[in-house]
Image (cartoon, rainbow, N blue to C red):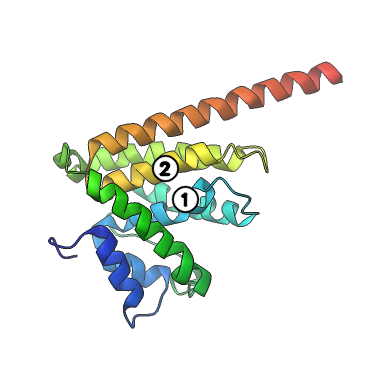
Amino acid sequence: MKSDESFSDQLERWLRSDASKTLGTLSDVFAEKSFAVMILLMMFVPAIPLPTGAITYLFEVITLVLTTQMVLGRRVLWLPDRWRHHELGTMTTGKAIPFVVRRVRWFERHSRPRWARLFEQRWFLRLLGLVLTAFALAAIIAPPFSGLDTFPAVGAVLVALAIVLEDFLILLIGIAIGTGGVVLILTIGVALVRVVRHLV
């Protein structure tokens, strides 16, 4: 990765390159930041407050695979060969990722490195892996078609973006939104259980 090139420019350059558009080549481009980049892209779809169907569950499961590796302290991203070599569709490379690039550029204009050295510490990244795991699990268990998975997904996107941009302020915002989403999902879940018990 070029130090003088922004994350959004690197992502756009990868899109315009002749390289095959797979998760494998994407992780190769971003090297040590590949965990955060992949989680950002995977959780961006669940973070959109629109009906996205069952595809969000696939992205959330992939995110769990990634966050588990973060917690274990892996430095190199591992993906099953089937996922690593699977070509991303034109919908993803032609619309979804360019949409992400535009949103990321907004954050880049307003962001700056804050407590950047923390993001270089292995123990801190493992801790963030736990946070991201909790947000991904919350998004998975959220009631279908309720839209409640949006909040932990947004939290995960912002935490991943904070890792990429090394901005502690964005990290705090992401943790606040994601944690609020987790609490909301658990609160509604407990209320639903009580209603069902009352009915039976």
Residue 45 drawn at (x, y percent): 51, 53
Verify CB contact (< 8 Å) between mark 1 and mark 2. Answer: yes
Rendered view: 183 above or below 145: above
Q: Amino acid at mark 2?
A: Ala
What is the distance, in whole Å, between disc 1 and disc 2 at their CAs?
7 Å
105 relative position to 148: left or right: left
Residue 79 drawn at (x, y percent): 42, 63
| Front-most of residues 61 and 192 | 192
Rendered view: 106 above or below 94: above
Query: Which residue in the rendered view is the most extreme toward the bottom?
Result: 18
Rendered view: 104 above or below 148: below
| Front-most of residues 38 and 6 | 6
Q: Which residue, given by chain and number where applicable, does mark 2 sit on?
A: 156
Instruction: Residue at 59%, 51% (x, y): give it.
Output: 57
Please say whether residue 194 is visible from this viewpoint: yes
- Res 185 → quadrant: top right
| Front-most of residues 13 and 138 | 13
Instruction: Residue at 82%, 16% (x, y): give it.
Output: 198
Disc assigned to residue 178 = none
| Front-most of residues 175 and 118 | 175
Upstream in the sequence, badge 1 or badge 2?
A: 1
Instruction: Residue at 19%, 65% (x, y): give it.
Output: 1
Element assignment for label 1: helix
Q: Amino acid at mark 1?
A: Met
Q: Which residue, given by chain and number where applicable, does mark 1 sit on?
A: 43
Please say whether residue 73 is visible from this viewpoint: no
- Res 117 → quadrant: top left
Query: Which residue in the rendered view is the most extreme toward the top?
Result: 198
Rendered view: 69 above or below 24: above
Residue 28 drawn at (x, y percent): 30, 68
Residue 133 drawn at (x, y percent): 44, 41
Element assignment for label 2: helix
